[in-house]
Image (spheres, rainbow, N blue to C red):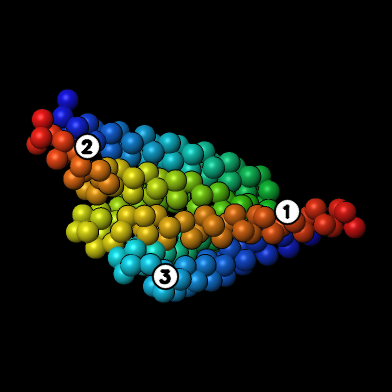
Amino acid sequence: MDMDIHRRMASFVVKSNWFLFVVATLLGFINTPFKFALGILCGGILVTLNFHLLRHTLYKAFDPSKMEFSSRNMTPWQGRSILNAVLFKYYIRFAISGIVIFALINKNIVEPMGLIIGLSVVVASIMAATALELTRLIFKEAV
Amino acid sequence: MDFFTACVWAAGIAIGVAAFGCGIGQGMGLNGAVQGIARNPESSGKVTVTLLIGLAMIESLCIYALVVALILIYAHPQAADILKTIAGS
């Protein structure tokens, strides 16, 4: 039951990420100036790719079939190496995002407010997933 | 202190504090997840999804801080007005 909620939330977040990204970009290009819409597009691509890379890193790091240890013989060193690998990849991703955002803002390619809206795509989809699950939970309890 | 120098200081301190806080937060979250999976490997799927969502939220905070810091340095909304004021006085 709980596992279903987790799987459902993960797939919802992944799907709604792309959906929100496409909708926000299209609305941006229709209703707002070009630089603003380009900001939404660039921010959306950046944060969605970041999210997928994070997902790939985490599933790879915590995949039980690929783990070379079981809970009985896991040493603190092995746990720490997983921690270090995930954090190292996080810093690499963050540095690349930083360089891209720096270039976009420094060269005045995009409008900063559009970029912030684009960067909010993942947060919005996570909020939507949480709201959906909460609504389901409340209605289930009411019934 | 010159206004723009103060902006650069603010941006530097902002991104430093944000990256430090996010690094600590992510490290603590990962630490908890690794310990949880080590104790109960069957819970790997649940923990990974929750961790993914948590880490994505934490990471976005740091990216917001980076954007605000870069706006302060390169795209300050009132930069032109402030320059005019400085030039006028």
Q: Is residue B45 visible?
A: no
**Spatial separation of the CA atoms under disc 2 and disc 1:** 42 Å
| The N terminus of chain A, quarter of image | bottom right
Q: Is residue A75 left or right of residue A50?
A: right
The residue carrying mark 3 is A31
> Disc 2, disc 1: CB below 8 Å?
no
| The C terminus of chain A, quarter of image | bottom right
Q: Residue at x 17, y 25 (%)?
A: B1
> Disc 3, disc 2: CB below 8 Å?
no
Q: Dot 2, crowdedness within 10 Å: few (<14), some or many (≥20)?
A: some
Q: Is residue A139 left or right of residue B79?
A: right
Disc 3 versus disc 1: nearer the observer = 3
Where B27 falls versus A116 (above or below)? above
Subunit under mark 1:
A
Q: Residue at x 37, y 59 (%)?
A: A114
Q: Position of residue A116 (x, y in %)?
A: 39, 54
**Spatial separation of the CA atoms under disc 3 and disc 1:** 32 Å
Q: Residue furthest top?
A: B1
Q: Residue furthest right?
A: A143
Q: Residue furthest front?
A: B88
> Disc 3, disc 1: CB below 8 Å?
no
Q: Position of residue A106 (x, y in %)?
A: 21, 54
Nearer to me, B23 or B75? B75
Q: Is residue A8 visible?
A: yes
The residue carrying mark 2 is B8
Q: Residue at x 56, y 53 (%)?
A: B53
Please tell me how many numbered marks the rendered image carries.
3
What is the number of the mark on residue A57? Answer: none
Nearer to me, A86 or A139? A139
The residue carrying mark 1 is A134
Q: Is residue A137 left or right of residue B58?
A: right
